[in-house]
Image (cartoon, grey):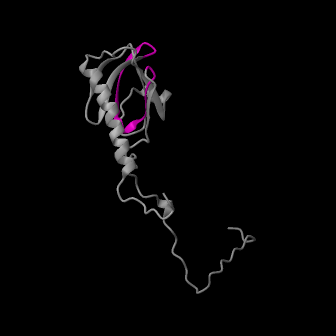
Amino acid sequence: MTDDTPESLIPYDEIVQEALRDVVGRVLSEVERAGGHLPGGHHFYITFQTKVPGVSIPKHLTERFPDEMTIVIQHRFWDLKVEDDRFSVGLSFGGVPSTLVVPFAAVTDFVDPAVDFSLKFQANAAPLEPEEHDEAENDVPEPAVEDGSNVVSVDFTKKK
């Protein structure tokens, strides 16, 4: 490639990321179809961003992992359910059973150390919309006085 290469109007990076996320969904679907049994020594480390819309984890986990969390799917997990755009799974944290719902768009890493397989992603979710609020009363600009000059006079000796 040279510096003269035009910028692509086709979002190849996004298309590839989406296709690789489909790999994660397909692998988890295979485990779901097998009744939640992982073949051989396979197990998964799945890292995801906890603030992405659609992520649902218990409050105590959000407090402990405010930005990113890694889960392990190996021996003790239950109710793995895979949909087109997300998965849910039951895991225990400190003896407390929890159900997690994770959109594939929130996943940043998928690793199966048993076979040295790894995928890395950019988080691919729309940011949360800002909350609506009243107009701030102190942010209204004061009307400018036009006198034809662009000089500002400041008098620090005058006290109000």
Q: Which residues are magenta?
A: 93-114
Q: Is residue 99 magenta?
A: yes
Seen at 52% across and 71% down, the residue is: 142
Q: Residue at x 55, y 83 (%)?
A: 146
What predominant SS class does the magenta segment belong to? strand
List the single residue furthest toward the right: 157
Residue 132 spot, x, y in % from top left: 38, 51
**Residue 40 locus on image (x, y percent):** 36, 14
Q: Nearer the viewer, residue 51 or 1?
A: 1
Left or right of residue 94: residue 32: left
The answer to whether 159 appears left or right of 67 in the picture is: right
Residue 124 can be seen in this image: yes
Closest to the observer, 106 or 160: 106
Would you identify the image quadrant in which residue 148 lies? bottom right
Question: Which residue is drawn at the image coordinates 46% and 29% (left, top)?
Answer: 69
Residue 4 at what x, y percent from top left? 48, 65
Residue sitting nearer the eye, 134 or 67? 67
- Determine whether 65 is above or below 53 in the image: above
Q: How many marks?
A: 0
Q: Where, quadrant-wise, is the C terminus in this rendering?
A: bottom right
Note whether 23 is above or below 37 in the view shown: below
